[in-house]
C-alpha cells in the first residue's frame, strides 16, 4: 500500500453526518458524478439488504486526513466473493477517488482483499470510460488476480444540447404526430400534465401505487417485478427518504385530472435527470403512456438550464433508442485468483455469445438449463430416491396410462363465510398476490399464467381475499362448450346450453389447509347460477381431498371421462348425460 494513503475498512455504512458530507463532496469532484455513488445510496442498500449483502466499506485518507477514496463493496454470506454493494440497484458503480489517488486506492483495496483470501471479485456496471478500469487492470496482476472484462450494458442517454430545435421552439421529438394523438386521447377529460414529487411527505402516499403498477405491468408482460420482493420495496422507500433530504429525488407522474397514467422513480443530480424505474397503467398500453411520459419529461428538461443530460439507464428497450443521441458503456469485470475459474468464466461467456447468434439454439439451451435447474431443485427438495421414482412413474405413464376425470354440477346450498370476499381478478389483485407470495415459485408461475389469460380476455378470473386483502384462493370460469381439458388432452362440451366450467383453481402455499378451495368455487358457482348459468367443475378421480371439498361446497358428481394413453396414441371414452334426458353421447379423441 502507498504510504500516502491510510486505508480504513468498515463492516457497515455508519450513520455519520460528517462522513456523509465528506463522501458526497468527493462524489461531486470526480469526473461524471452519479447519484449511485452517494452516501445515501449505499446507506439505503444497507438498510434494505443487510441480511444478504454484508457491506465492506473502504475509505482512504490522505496525509491531511482528508477523505480521498471511497468504495462500497459487499461480501456474500460465505464471505468468499466480493462485489459492488450497489451492483443490483445502481446503474453505475465505481471506485470514487480523484485521478491522482485512483491507482493507489484501487491497488490498496485489492491488496487488502487478497490478504483476506478473497479469490472471486465481480464488479458489475463499471463505466467503461472510467479511469478505474485501467487502475484495476494494472493492480489485479500485482495482487495475483486474473482480469477479464466484457460489456454489460449500453446505457442510452439524451444530450439536451444536441436535441434538434428551432429558436424559441420545443425540441424536435420522435413521432410527434403519434405523440399528439395519444396525449389528446388520454387527455379527453383534462389536459395531460407532469406532476413531480420531491419531498418524502409528497412521495410517501404515491409510492405504493407506483409499486403496484410496476408489479402489475411486469405480470402483464410475463415477468416478475423486483418490486414484488419486500427488500426492494424497503430499498425504494429508504432511498426516497434519504435522497429527498438533499432534493435529488423526483417521483414523476403523468396525469390527467386526478388519474395517474405513468410514473418514473427518478433523480436529478449534478446536471442529469435519471430515467430509473418507469412504469405505466397497462390498461392504457395502446396509447404508449411510457413513451408519452418520456417525451414530456424530455421537453421539460430541455427548458431547464441546470440539466445537461437525461440518462435512460440500463436496458436496450427500443423506445429508448428513438430518444437517445449518445450512450455510455458499462462493463462486467471479474477478478479471479484461480486461473481455472478464469478460464471457465471466459468459456461460459464465449459459449453464450455463440448461442445468441442462433435464436433456435439459444432457446434450446435455455430450455435445457431450465429443466436441469428444476431437476436439481427437486432433488434438493425431495431427495434422489423420490425424484428417481417420479421419473420412472413418468416413463411408465408414457408407455401406458389411464386417467379418470370426474365432472360435478353445483346444486347448492352454500354457507357463506363473512370473513372473506370474492373479487374479480385484475392486474392490481395479481400484483398484490405476487408481493404476498414472492417466495413461492409455483404461485408466481400461476400468477404469470393468470396475467396472460387476463390479457386474452377469454375467461373470467376470481380471487378470494380476507379482511386484510391477502389472496387466499384463485379460480377461473369460462363456457363449458369447446373447453379444452388438459387432463384429457381433448376438447369437451357441456351437457346442455348455458353450462359454465370452473377451472384452474389454485391456493397459495401459505394459505393451504383451511378449506378455501371449496369456499371459493362454491361462491363462484352461486354467482354463475345467479346469472342464469349452470356451474360445473372437474377433478381427477383419485384426488379424494378435492372431491371432498367440492361435495362440501354443494357440487354433485354427474359423470366421468377416461383417457387411455399409450406411446403417443390416446382415446377418451365415457358418456355425457344430457340434462334434457336425450340419449347419452360417447366421446372419443385421438392424437
Image (cartoon, rainbow, N blue to C red):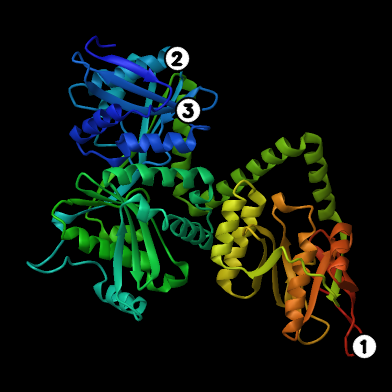
Q: Earlier in the sequence, mark 2 or mark 1?
A: 2
Along the viewing direction, whichever of 171 and 208 lies nearer the viewer:
208
Residue 583 shows which numbered tag? 1
Q: Quadrant of the C terminus?
A: bottom right
Q: Earlier in the sequence, mark 3 or mark 2?
A: 3
- In percent of the image, x 37 and y 18: which residue is there? 9
Horizontal and vertical percent for residue 577? 90, 82
- In percent of the image, x 19 and y 26: which residue is there? 99
Q: CA distance from mark 3 to mark 2?
A: 15 Å
Residue 144 visible? The answer is: no
Callout 1 environment at 10 Å: few (<14), some (14 to 19), or many (20+)? few
Along the viewing direction, whichever of 586 and 78 lies nearer the viewer:
78
Apparent side of residue 148 relative to residue 104 in the rendered image (left or right): right
Task: Please tell me whether residue 547 is drawn above or below residue 207 in the rendered image.
Answer: below
Along the viewing direction, whichever of 225 and 243 lies nearer the viewer:
243
Q: CA distance from mark 1 to mark 3?
A: 72 Å
Residue 537 shows which numbered tag? none
Q: Nearer the viewer, mark 1 or mark 3?
A: 3
Please say if the residues under marks 1 and 3 sit with CB atoms less than 8 Å apart. no
Apparent side of residue 266 relative to residue 336 in the rendered image (left or right): left
Residue 116 shows which numbered tag? 2
Horizontal and vertical percent for residue 149? 36, 32
Q: CA distance from mark 2 to mark 1?
A: 82 Å
Q: Secondary structure at mark 1?
A: loop
Task: Please tell me whether residue 414 is drawn above or below residue 29 in the rendered image.
Answer: below
Apparent side of residue 67 relative to residue 369 in the rendered image (left or right): left
Q: Secondary structure at mark 2?
A: loop
> Which quarter of the figure has residue 328?
top left
> Which quarter of the figure has residue 293?
bottom left
Apparent side of residue 391 relative to residue 86 in the rendered image (left or right): right
Horizontal and vertical percent for residue 237? 43, 46
Residue 54 shows which numbered tag? 3
Amino acid at each position: 500500500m502507498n504510504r500516502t494513503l491510510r486505508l480504513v475498512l468498515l463492516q457497515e455504512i455508519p450513520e455519520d453526518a460528517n462522513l456523509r458530507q465528506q463522501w458526497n463532496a468527493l462524489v461531486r469532484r470526480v469526473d461524471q458524478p452519479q447519484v449511485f455513488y452517494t452516501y445515501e445510496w449505499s446507506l439505503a442498500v444497507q438498510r434494505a439488504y443487510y441480511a444478504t449483502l454484508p457491506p465492506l466499506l473502504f475509505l482512504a485518507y490522505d496525509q491531511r486526513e482528508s477523505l480521498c477514496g471511497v468504495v462500497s463493496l459487499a461480501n456474500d454470506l460465505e464471505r468468499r466473493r466480493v462485489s459492488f454493494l450497489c451492483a443490483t440497484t445502481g446503474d453505475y458503480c465505481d471506485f470514487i477517488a480523484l485521478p491522482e489517488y485512483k491507482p493507489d486506492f484501487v491497488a490498496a483495496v485489492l491488496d487488502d482483499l487478497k490478504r483476506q483470501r478473497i479469490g472471486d471479485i465481480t464488479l458489475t456496471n463499471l463505466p467503461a470510460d472510467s479511469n478505474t478500469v485501467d487502475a484495476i487492470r494494472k493492480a489485479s496482476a500485482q495482487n495475483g488476480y486474473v482480469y477479464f472484462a466484457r460489456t454489460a450494458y449500453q446505457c442510452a442517454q439524451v444530450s439536451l444540447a444536441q436535441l434538434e430545435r428551432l429558436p424559441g421552439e420545443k425540441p424536435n421529438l420522435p413521432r410527434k404526430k403519434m405523440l399528439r394523438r395519444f396525449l389528446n386521447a388520454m387527455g379527453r377529460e383534462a389536459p395531460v400534465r407532469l406532476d413531480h414529487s420531491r419531498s418524502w411527505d409528497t412521495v410517501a402516499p404515491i409510492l405504493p401505487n407506483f409499486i403496484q403498477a410496476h408489479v402489475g405491468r411486469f405480470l402483464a408482460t410475463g415477468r416478475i417485478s423486483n418490486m414484488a420482493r419486500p427488500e426492494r420495496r424497503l430499498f425504494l422507500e429508504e432511498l426516497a427518504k434519504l435522497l429527498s433530504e438533499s432534493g435529488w429525488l423526483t417521483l414523476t407522474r403523468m396525469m390527467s385530472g386526478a388519474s395517474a397514467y405513468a410514473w418514473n422513480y427518478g433523480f436529478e443530480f449534478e446536471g442529469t435527470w435519471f430515467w430509473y424505474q418507469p412504469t405505466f397503467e397497462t390498461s392504457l398500453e395502446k396509447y404508449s403512456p411510457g413513451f408519452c411520459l418520456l417525451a414530456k419529461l424530455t421537453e421539460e428538461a430541455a427548458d431547464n438550464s441546470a440539466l445537461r443530460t437525461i440518462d435512460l439507464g440500463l436496458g436496450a428497450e427500443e423506445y429508448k433508442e428513438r430518444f437517445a443521441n449518445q450512450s455510455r458503456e458499462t462493463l462486467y469485470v471479474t477478478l479471479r485468483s484461480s486461473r481455472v475459474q478464469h478460464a471457465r468464466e471466459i468459456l461460459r461467456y464465449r459459449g453464450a455469445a455463440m448461442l445468441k447468434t442462433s435464436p433456435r439454439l439459444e432457446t434450446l439451451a435455455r430450455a435445457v438449463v431450465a429443466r436441469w435447474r428444476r431437476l436439481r431443485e427437486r432433488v434438493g427438495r425431495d431427495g434422489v430416491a423420490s425424484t428417481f421414482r417420479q421419473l420412472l412413474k413418468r416413463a411408465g405413464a408414457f408407455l401406458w396410462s389411464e386417467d379418470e376425470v370426474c365432472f360435478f354440477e353445483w346444486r347448492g346450498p352454500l354457507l357463506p363465510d363473512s370473513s372473506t370476499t370474492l373479487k374479480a381478478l385484475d392486474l392490481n389483485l395479481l400484483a398484490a398476490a405476487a408481493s404476498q407470495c414472492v417466495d413461492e415459485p409455483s404461485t408466481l408461475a400461476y400468477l404469470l399464467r393468470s396475467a396472460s389469460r387476463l390479457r386474452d380476455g377469454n375467461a373470467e378470473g376470481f380471487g378470494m381475499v380476507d379482511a386484510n386483502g391477502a389472496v387466499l384462493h384463485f379460480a377461473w370460469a369460462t363456457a363449458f362448450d369447446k373447453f379444452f381439458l388438459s387432463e384429457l388432452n381433448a376438447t369437451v362440451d357441456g351437457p346442455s346450453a348455458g353450462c359454465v366450467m370452473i377451472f384452474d383453481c389454485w391456493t397459495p402455499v401459505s394459505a393451504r389447509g383451511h378449506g378455501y378451495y371449496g369456499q371459493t368455487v362454491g361462491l363462484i358457482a352461486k354467482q354463475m347460477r345467479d346469472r342464469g348459468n349452470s356451474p360445473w367443475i372437474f377433478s381427477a378421480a383419485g384426488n379424494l381431498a378435492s372431491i371432498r371439498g367440492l361435495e362440501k361446497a354443494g357440487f354433485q358428481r354427474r359423470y366421468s371421462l377416461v383417457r387411455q394413453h399409450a406411446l403417443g396414441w390416446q382415446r377418451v371414452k365415457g358418456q355425457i348425460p344430457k340434462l334434457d334426458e336425450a340419449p347419452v353421447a360417447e366421446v372419443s379423441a385421438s392424437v
